[in-house]
Image (tube, rainbow, N blue to C red):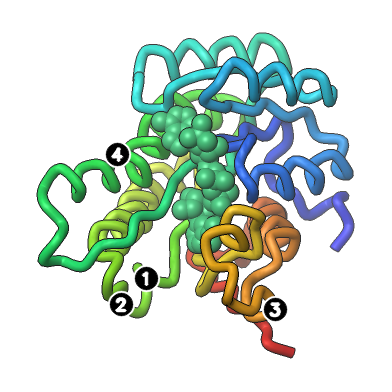
Amino acid sequence: MSDEGTTRSGGAVLVTGAAGALGEAVLARLATTRRPVAALVRSVDDAATLRGGGVWATPVDLLDEAAVAAAVASATAEVGPIGDALLLAGGFAMAPAAETDLAALRRQWDLNVATAASVVRALLPVVAAAGGGTLVGVGAGQARRGGARATAYAAAKAALAAYLRAVDEEWAARGVRTVTVFPMGTLDTAANRRAMPDADPRAWIDPDVLAEVLLQALHLGPRGRWREVEVHPDAG
Ligand SMILES: NC(=O)c1ccc[n+]([C@@H]2O[C@H](COP(=O)([O-])OP(=O)(O)OC[C@H]3O[C@@H](n4cnc5c(N)ncnc54)[C@H](OP(=O)(O)O)[C@@H]3O)[C@@H](O)[C@H]2O)c1
């Protein structure tokens, strides 16, 4: 698909979790689009590293609403109006229901729902003012088909998808759409290879493929679009 004629929104793309494994793949893909990028990362060091690579980046705790609002304002001032966002920040926790206390449940909610919701809330008027755009979240297979032994994670990712669905219903008429992309398996990242040294990474999803899908979610035309997309491993 060419970049011309298919992107409904323009302007800059805001990326959260930009210093993560998927973030690295996404930033590499975005660099080929020539769209301005605003990267939100947690640490000062990660922001400096990305800036060294020519990406506008700022450190912010996505659970700090005031800091997120300020980061979105400085991103807009520095890279231009934000048209789309790729909400990659999140994380995994393994624990069965009997070992998941409310603190663990809330931690997963914060990590996977609140980190997106804080940015969405700050961005809604910004993206609408830019003429509309798409906010893309990352779900997980556990939210689609059952997440035994990852109870809190499954619940949080399902909640993220429901949250984004509700935002879409509220804001689509003002041009702001949402998409949830569900990786239906493990990503082939260095962290996962370290954590599961005996697993076969060929059965995992290539982060570059997922990054491509995330960018495609921004490109679909106004008469047909994705709302929720599953990306499966391809065992070949
Ligand atoms: N990896 C997988 O196998 C897999 C599978 C399915 C879905 N996913 C989802 O895909 C997304 C990306 O995964 P990934 O493998 O790239 O994870 P990752 O490498 O851990 O990256 C996630 C990023 O989110 C950032 N983050 C988390 N909480 C934050 C906060 N409060 N403020 C600012 N930044 C925050 C993290 O920063 P810090 O490093 O500083 O904490 C990290 O850079 C996540 O939503 C994940 O749940 C991953």
Residue placed under numbered mark 1 in the picture: 142
Q: For the residue marked with disc 3, what is the amino acid?
A: Arg
Q: For the residue marked with disc 4, what is the amino acid?
A: Asp
Asked whether mark 4 lies closer than 8 Å to ligand 1, one says yes
Residue placed under numbered mark 4 in the picture: 110
Q: Nearer the viewer, residue 47 or 82?
A: 47
How packed mark 3 is, by other alpha carbons closer than 10 Å (few <14, some 14-19, many 20 or more), is: few
Closer to viewer: mark 3 or mark 4: 3
Q: Nearer the viewer, residue 57 or 93?
A: 93
What is the quadrant of the C terminus in the image?
bottom right
Residue placed under numbered mark 3 in the picture: 202
* Mark earlier in primary sequence (4, 2): 4
Give the CA distance from mark 4 to mark 1.
17 Å
Q: Position of residue 111 (x, y in %)?
A: 36, 41
Q: Position of residue 225 (x, y in %)?
A: 59, 64
The residue positioned 41% from the left and 42% from the top of the image is: 171
Asked whether mark 1 lies closer than 8 Å to ligand 1, one says no
Residue 146, label in figure: 2
